[in-house]
Amino acid sequence: MPKLELFFQQNRAVSPTPPRAAKPSSPPYHCTHSIRSIVALTFVLIFILLLFSCGDTYAQDRRITIHPNEISSIRHTIIERLPDGEPTCCEHEWNVRYLHYHPASVVPRRMYHSACNTDTNTPSMFTSVSLGENRRHPEPDPSSGAIIRSEYDPATGRLIPKEMRRFKECIWSEGIATSSDCSTIAMLCRRNFDDKDFDFDSLATHKDKDWMTQPKCAHHSMWLYEWNNGDIMSTPRKYVVHRSMDFDWEYGNNYLRYAEDQNVYGIGMKARVFGGGGCHEADAFLVLNRTDYHFTDRGYAWACGTGHTIFNRPVYNEETGKFALMCGTDGSNAGSNLAGYWFRREDLQSKEFFRTNFSNIHFKGGPGALLPMEDGGYLGILVGVNGRVRPQNEVPQTPPTSIGLVRFDSQGDMVGAIKWVAEKDNTYLSHPQLAKLGTNRFLLGYGEMKRLRDAKDTSDESYRIPWNHYLLEIDANGNRLTDPIELEGAGWGEQDEMVSLGNGRVGWAYIPDPTLKSANEYASCNSKQLQLSVYGVR
């Protein structure tokens, strides 16, 4: 097992400043001795309480009050050395984002998370992360994949790394899923198209296997690695699930969801196929039966909505027993130069519920995380413009984007209007996060991006990298339960998804100190360190 070197980042304590009391008059002499004794005893008691409340000597905590009897904190653990000393892998060139694109690599490649044992005091978080030094385009990066298992420590309130494993044969590590008890772990591994060391070709069982086997347009295939003994250091079983993966244009992402009550995987993938004399970009959502590792007829082999798939966020709802996706594309039923936001349940047609401006591969928003609700419906987060969007040849700079909350019923119909839960004058917001904390209690995250009237914001990097990251709690109607707090020395990736750790906690991983420092100053996407973060009540 690789040696795990840990560094616990210090956080500044944040507490409200009490009002300054009027200076009391001097007490009579006979009271002075007793007051001094009380003061001395008070300091002793405070010191003892601080020793017990800290739980360790590494850091003070940044705290906010959630409820009178609950204190929520944000705690970080930095992994100083990743597997084999490799750095985090940079995104591929020309990556499409919520607000802009870039011909170079500027931030780390997408990371994926899954959690298990969330009904205990020591849940585990599994992080799928890609590694490798960035090379100058068009030379390919010598990248690989990895899994990191961390465990929540209730004594310190931190995630502690337990195991790390690198997969040199994986071009990238992508979606990850776990069973509730951590006995089953599965990961999507992007492989070279001609690799043959699989245990079973699941794709060969799909009715549309030929459509998903496209050597003319694809250099990669997608494999599923699975462990049924809870041990990522052991040998996984390997299954081929798609053969039309490529990276010329970075549309969409690759997700893995486990429907434990049905014993099936839902696999959402961005695909590239050949047809009509050229290559085409969209996505697929397939459902794999774990009984025999054959594909079912559920899902679809091509396109969540009209146009090229830019964003694809799947989720499973136990109440209905159905997978569903919230997607973003460069097509819309309302006409050209509009990008659609779509909801698609696995067994129903796509429904466009919102739209925004786009031009070429420059977008102005898109859908984010989608969560299942207990009534069979869904709750989603998105980046967009509050108001009517009109088709234009170029993406208009104003108004800036905001963060919206959207609800759907069990059939995928939007319930009410989008609730704009975070807005700021003359400032773009993006990097949306939504994760469940408890009953009708959710963690909302967003990044503060381009500042239109800031003389220091002179480059386009602020469309891609936040100046600041914020977290707050909301209910399912978008009502604020806490005020936003600004993170210090921490953040998350644009397309990354935080994961619930149970008992009012949420976890994620990203590089340390990722915010924009000046117009063209930001952290390297090739980071030697990874930071594990926890939000929640200790």
Image (cartoon, rainbow, N blue to C red):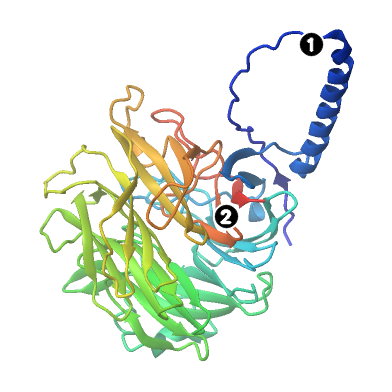
Q: Position of residue 42 (x, y in %)?
A: 81, 28
Judged left or right of residue 438, residue 13 is right
Q: CA distance from mark 2 to mark 1?
A: 52 Å
Q: Nearer the viewer, residue 131 or 497?
A: 497
Look at mark 1 in the image and give the residue it sits on: 27
- Image vertical order of residue 211 relative to residue 305, above or below: below
Report the mark closest to the observer, 2 or 1.
Answer: 1
Q: Quadrant of residue 321?
A: bottom left
Residue picked out by circle 2 = 507
Q: Residues within 10 Å of mark 2 (few under 14, many from 20)?
A: many
Q: Position of residue 276 (x, y in %)?
A: 16, 74
Question: Which quadrant is home to the N terminus?
Answer: bottom right
Element at label 2: strand
Which residue occupies 26% across, 71% down?
303
Which residue is located at x 24 percent, y 72 percent? 350
Camera-side residue: 218 or 1? 1
Question: What is the quadrant of residue 32 in the picture?
Answer: top right
- The residue that appears at 42% across and 68% down in the rendered structure is 373
Relative to 111, residue 229 above or below: below
x, y percent for residue 255 = 44, 67
**Residue 210 in view in this figure:** yes
- For the point 83% across and 36% down, the residue is 48
In the image, residue 476 sits, relative to residue 457, either above or below, namely below
Query: Is 387 positioned to the left or the right of 411 in the image?
Result: left
Q: Is 319 rendered above or below residue 476? A: below
Q: Secondary structure at mark 1?
A: loop
